[in-house]
Amino acid sequence: MTTFQKSSASNTSRRRPKSLAQEVVNDLVGQIKAGILKQGDKLPTESELMQMQGVSRTVVREAISRLQAAGVVETRHGIGSFVLGILNEQNFHIDPTDLVTIQDILYVLELRQSLESAAAGIAALKRTESDLAVLSGILHEFKQLLEGGQETVDADFRFHLSIAQATGNRYFVEFMSYLGQTVIPRTRINTASLGAETQMRYLERVHYEHQEIYKAIQLQNPLVASSAMQMHLNNSAERLRSTLRK
């Protein structure tokens, strides 16, 4: 059995806490390329990875989801995750470290607009009471975090991921998991500073738009749900485009 070792790169101080999942991905890919983890090897358990990497279970799961989407590992339910092979650099992938300009972030938002608006419409048709309970809980959590002046990025991402899960289509889920929190523009730049509104006002608007998406899904109206998601993402994109026109 292969002994998992943590590379020196992951022993260094993490300078960008919001990209922890990608750092875990990079570390695991490095293990595979170095031959420490070979094709067919079973990855350490979630708990073991949490301890080795010093991250939360959410971060570990996001990292594994990205590796699955990239075709590096496969997860067999009830058994674990296994190495399929070395990352093929020609496979489609979005490296968060490449999202350094406003235009880069806009490109990702444009991609999301088409996929997530479709996901919202499908979720409206297929959602269950359990799905609604999850979405409602996240909306409540977002509001509490906002009122308490706390970080809302994780709740924001989980709202979008939960809509993907409500479609019942694993490919929507895998795509959102693959992108992770990098889909939230404010993890890359301070979006509130781009316009006249304050950070609080900006996040209040995000919360309102999430509520409108939720209401349409709750009412099982796919057209309104799709339009609400399209408008939500377009508003974020338009704020970024406005800076390019200055």
Image (cartoon, rainbow, N blue to C red):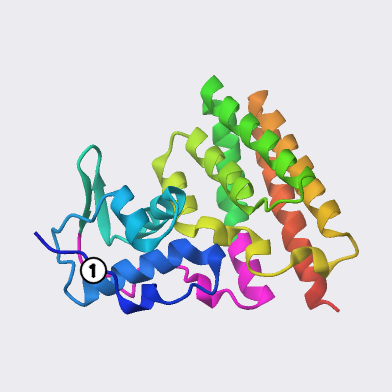
Who's the residue at 46% across and 46% down the image? 172
Q: Say above or below: 98 vs 193.
A: below
Which residue is at the front of the view, 137 or 67? 137
Who's the residue at 39% across and 65% down the image? 24
Single out the residue that lies furthest toward the left: 1
In the displayed structure image, the side of residue 221 where residue 182 appears, left or right: left
The segment highlighted magenta reads: 84-110
Which residue is at the front of the view, 134 or 24? 24
Quadrant of the frame with the N terminus: bottom left
Classify residue 194 by image quadrant: bottom right
Q: Say above or below: 139 vs 236.
A: above
In the displayed structure image, the side of residue 140 where residue 20 appears, left or right: left
In the displayed structure image, the side of residue 121 where residue 84 appears, left or right: left
At which x and y percent is residue 136?
64, 30
- What residue is pinned by disc 1? 5
- Residue 94 is covered by the magenta coloring: yes
Q: Is residue 135 visible?
A: yes
Q: Say above or below: 47 vs 223.
A: below
Classify residue 90 by image quadrant: bottom left
In the displayed structure image, the side of residue 104 where residue 33 appears, left or right: left
At which x and y percent is residue 134?
57, 31
- The amino acid beneath tag 1 is Gln
> Element type at marker 1?
loop
- Residue 41 is covered by the magenta coloring: no
Which residue is at the front of the view, 213 or 186? 186
